[in-house]
Amino acid sequence: MTESILTHSSDDSKIISGACLPIDHEPDILSLRPEGFLEYVGQAEVVETLKIAIEAAKKRSEPLDHVLFHGPPGLGKTTLAHIISNEMESNITATSGPALEKGGDLLGILTHLEEGDILFVDEIHRLPRVVEEFLYPAMEDFAVDFIFDKGVHARSHRYRLKRFTIVGATTRVGLLSAPLRDRFGIFRSLDFYSEKDLIKIINRSASLLEVKIDNKGANELSKRSRGTPRIANRLLKRVRDYAQVREDGDITEKTVKAALLLEGVDEKGLTDLDRRYIKTIIEFYNCGPVGIEAIAATLQEETDTLVDVVEPYLLKVGLITRTSSGRKASESACIHLGFRV
């Protein structure tokens, strides 16, 4: 089983597999995460819902209702889980669906949770069925059932758990079973960020990374970040490297364009894989419609990669469309890639 991470919101360290590591030793992407709602940018309706629910739960001295976030990768699902932990002044244990291979893996985590703790399960739609069914009484009744012995000697014992909150995150909400989905009291979708919000995130991250970026530079970077804070932070660090090596260290619009040209990210934020995906539909299948399996076979890529990583943004900006008979490239996609309409 993949080891879970236990973080203490009231301490300046994290416990990972029994070893205490200072926060300064974490990867940069973690240090850029906001720790509270005051620092969090975007997703206004989601944040307001959580603020009300958290304040109400604290007034009643109860754990927060189970929370489910869904949306494309990089929009802040994990960040919100840690913010919930900080706002509730509780500990958080993080794991993922694929890491929980059998009921015993989950049982070990659940029995170590304290009153009000947060259990964050990333990619919760990938929980094995046996683990998911084990989770039902834990979520509803805060209890788990042990089976002792086998055959005619088998007997069941119910173990009471301390009240806790599960925060689930998924990129494929349609793959969640109805019984699991219905056990979440708070169900919120995270959408792509506006360029205005991304500029705020980029300026905040640049300040934390101690690099200067002007308004035009931040604006250009936001346009190429696919509406995703994780991508904005990743590209910012690549532009920072370029500015420190090839320029005077400050980030300008010119620096952003030059650095991202090397990264293969165009003015719409499309990567090489995005462009190959669209070109495949246009060149091989006459702009579509074509099934996702055919596109994946042509590109020699996994279908899940295309569905989870490539398509959400292309659909959002209207470069492709989904129909009952398959995917189609839009007129704007053809124009963007230089094809005659």
Image (cartoon, helix red, strand yellow):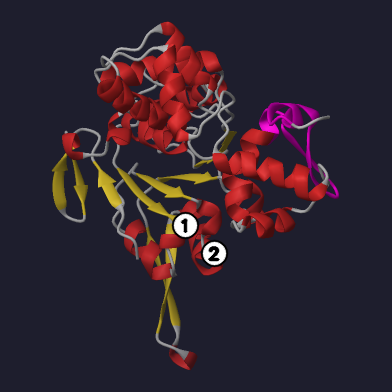
In the image, which disc is placed on residue 97? 1
User: Is label 1 in a helix, a strand or a loop?
Assistant: helix
Q: Please state if 257 lies on the left or on the right of 209 as rendered.
A: right
In the image, which disc is placed on residue 248? none
Residue type of the residue flagged with mark 2: Glu
Q: Quadrant of the C terminus?
A: top right
Q: Residues within 10 Å of mark 2 (few under 14, many from 20)?
A: some
Residue bounds of the magenta highlight = 315-338
State whether residue 182 appears in this view: no
Residue under label 2:
133
Residue type of the residue flagged with mark 1: Gly
Residue 199 locus on image (x, y percent): 46, 15
Residue 218 locus on image (x, y percent): 43, 14
Q: Residues within 10 Å of mark 1 (few under 14, many from 20)?
A: some
Residue 304 locus on image (x, y percent): 60, 54
Q: Please state if 130 lies on the left or on the right of 284 as rendered.
A: left
Q: Please state if 72 lies on the left or on the right of 9 as rendered.
A: right
Q: Please state if 135 lies on the left or on the right of 243 as rendered.
A: right
Whether 211 is drawn above or below 129: the answer is above
Is 65 magenta? The answer is no
